[in-house]
């Protein structure tokens, strides 16, 4: 056997919310194994910059769609230009922290819309063609909070767990067609989003930003935050042609932060 072949060169992936951060990490890993991409984000400049970077580095075809994936119009804009879809990576921004006493039905509907129902709508749109073509890989970027809830992030805990529960059943319905549905659960990664968490930690602990960063790093068994290429690699592996027997799984990639044997 020669080098490891992911077997997905020339396939097409929609990578939602991918101009930076974890979505970009997934987009880059897929591009590196020859997958053509549809990338989206709300901000045009960063999206174009990121798409150009991957085009230049890997020579794959990339379509950019400037849109909000949590809206119906945004998803329509993606699906109108997507063409054949072999791989779908669901991702979007997370809901805000807060106190459950303040949340109304509307607060919950907004969180469910963004972190469950928009992923559901994307899955619903692509899954039958995946079944027909006998190949499909669906990965939801959720959060470590699905496994180890973060009290202040109740909306995230709830909405992402709901998506995960639905996908657990769906995975078993479509596995016979070589369509897999899995979740990737990030712990703490070195993305722009972590800066907010660092700022909150600095404020609550009354320490400087560098000290707050050090504190987060030192709490992790690896003594550092995760890097997006490490997350992206796991995504590409989940999407590989050889991963047809890997389905209905939720893999926590958190440097061992969640302390359990299994
Ligand atoms: P990030 O670095 O802030 O990147 C977010 C990316 O998504 C950007 O490209 C952003 O571009 C795009 N985006 C956000 N909302 C969008 C929307 N509604 N429609 C289209 N594109 C959108 O964030 P991240 O750290 O990669 O986090 C990604 C997801 O993982 C979030 O849901 C986050 O809660 C979750 N998560 C992250 C961590 C972590 O440590 N980083 C841990 C647990 C969970 P635009 O702003 O231009 O749209």
Image (tube, rainbow, N blue to C red):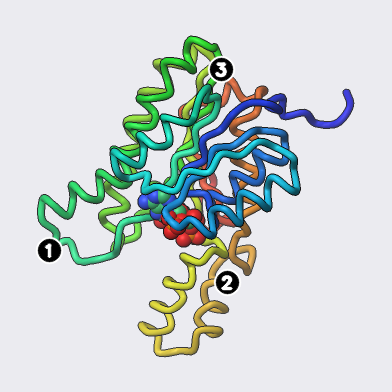
Tell me the tag on residue 42: none
In the rendering, at what x and y percent does residue 64 appear? 53, 43
The residue under the point 33% across, 37% down is 163
Using a 10 Å C-alpha cutoff, classify the residue at mark 1 as few (fewer than 14 neighbours), some (14 to 19) or many (20 or more). Answer: few
The residue under the point 59% across, 21% down is 244
Would residue 60 appear left or right of 245 to someone viewing this image?
right
Q: Secondary structure at mark 2?
A: helix
In the rendering, at what x and y percent does residue 216 appear? 52, 72
Tags 2 and 1 touching, CB below 8 Å? no
Pointer 1 residue: 101
In the image, residue 38 above or below residue 43 = above
Using a 10 Å C-alpha cutoff, classify the residue at mark 2 as few (fewer than 14 neighbours), some (14 to 19) or many (20 or more). Answer: some
Using a 10 Å C-alpha cutoff, classify the residue at mark 3 as few (fewer than 14 neighbours), some (14 to 19) or many (20 or more). Answer: some
Q: Quadrant of the N terminus?
A: top right
Would residue 43 appear left or right of 178 to someone viewing this image?
left
Q: Is residue 244 visible?
A: yes
Pointer 3 residue: 135
Distance of label 3 from label 1 (alpha carbons): 45 Å
Pointer 2 residue: 217
| Between discs 2 and 3, the one toward the N terminus | 3
Q: Is residue 249 visible?
A: no
In the image, residue 30 above or below residue 199 = above
Would residue 49 appear left or right of 195 to someone viewing this image?
right
Which quadrant of the view contains residue 116?
Answer: top left
In the rendering, at what x and y percent does residue 147 appear? 40, 47
């Amino acid at each position: 056997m020669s080098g490891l072949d992911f077997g997905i060169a020339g396939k097409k992936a929609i990578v939602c919310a991918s101009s930076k951060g974890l979505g970009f990490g997934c987009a880059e890993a897929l591009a590196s194994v020859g997958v053509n991409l549809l990338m989206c984000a709300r901000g045009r400049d960063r999206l174009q910059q990121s798409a150009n970077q991957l085009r230049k580095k890997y020579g794959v075809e990339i379509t950019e769609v400037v849109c909000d994936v949590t809206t119906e119009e945004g998803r329509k804009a993606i699906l109108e230009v997507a063409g054949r879809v072999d791989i779908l990576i669901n991702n979007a921004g997370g809901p805000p922290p807060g106190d459950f006493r303040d949340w109304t039905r509307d607060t919950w509907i907004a969180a469910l819309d963004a972190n469950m129902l928009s992923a559901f709508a994307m899955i619903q749109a692509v899954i039958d063609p995946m079944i027909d073509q006998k190949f499909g890989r669906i990965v939801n970027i959720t959060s470590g909070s699905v496994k180890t809830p973060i009290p202040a992030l109740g909306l995230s805990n709830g909405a992402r767990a709901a998506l995960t529960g639905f996908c657990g059943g769906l995975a078993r319905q479509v596995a016979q067609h070589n369509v897999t549905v899995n979740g990737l659960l990030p712990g703490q990664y070195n993305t722009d989003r972590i800066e907010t968490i660092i700022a909150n930690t600095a404020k609550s602990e009354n320490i400087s930003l560098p000290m707050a960063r050090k504190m987060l790093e030192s709490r992790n068994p690896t003594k550092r935050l995760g890097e997006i290429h490490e997350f992206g690699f796991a995504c590409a592996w989940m999407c590989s042609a050889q991963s047809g027997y890997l389905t209905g799984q939720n893999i926590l990639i958190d440097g061992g932060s969640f302390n359990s044997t299994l």
